[in-house]
Image (tube, rainbow, N blue to C red):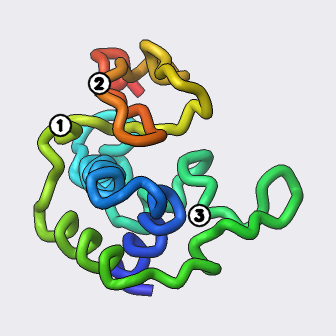
Amino acid sequence: MDDVELLARILQCEAGGEGEDGMRAVATVIANRLEETQGEYGRQNTLEDVIFALRQFDCARETIGGRYNPQNIYNMRPEQIHYDIAEWALNGGRLPIVSESLWYFNPYMPSCRENFPNQNGTFGIRIGDHCFYLPTESYYLT
């Protein structure tokens, strides 16, 4: 699977219901991790490294907790919008309001935590169902 296909599939799976800005925000975070030179993401050199890193994206796993995960990238059938956003991000496109974010997650509640669960990120903005987080100084020690 090439990088555009991989990113299109993860976008559909992770943010397909979040609209264009939501998908662009997720694509920005993934691209930021790919370009990061410090901390844990600085040790990941390819898009595959980023997507398949341990405990990062549930959509990249076929099983979770020993059970089959039907919502995984292998079951996705991306549409043109997913490919367009994937190409946009891989060609340097970034959504400015999350241009520094390294994490996002869906809290399944109306509010976002102030800190990312690992305490290495601080809340930046919410887009749709996802909360986006900026790295703190402690991230660079990971």
Give the quadrant of residue 49.
Answer: bottom left
Q: Residue 38 carries which label?
A: none
Q: Nearer the viewer, residue 81 or 113?
A: 81
CB within 8 Å, label 3 to label 1 = no
Residue 88 vs 98, above or below: the answer is below
Give the CA distance from mark 3 to mark 1: 25 Å
Residue that mark 3 sits on? 60
Label 3 or label 2, whichever comes before in sequence order? 3
Residue that mark 1 sits on? 97
Q: Nearer the viewer, residue 50 or 112?
A: 112
Residue that mark 2 sits on? 124
Label 1 or label 2, whichever comes before in sequence order? 1
Name the quarter where the C terminus is drawn: top left
Q: At which x and y percent is residue 87?
A: 22, 75
Residue 140 vs 72, above or below: the answer is above
Give the CA distance from mark 3 to mark 2: 25 Å
Indicate the secondary structure of the residue bearing disc 2: strand
Indicate the secondary structure of the residue bearing disc 1: helix
In the displayed structure, does residue 11 sit left or right of residue 83?
A: right
Image depth: mark 3 or mark 1 in front: 1
Q: Nearer the viewer, residue 70 or 52?
A: 70
Q: Residue at x 30, y 28 (%)?
A: 125
Name the quarter where the N terminus is drawn: bottom left
In the displayed structure, does residue 79 sit left or right of residue 109?
A: left
Give the CA distance from mark 1 to mark 2: 8 Å
Q: At which x and y percent is residue 111?
A: 49, 20
Q: Which residue is drawn at 36% across and 48% down?
A: 43
Q: At which x and y percent is residue 19?
A: 36, 58
Which kind of residue does numbered mark 2 sit on? Gly
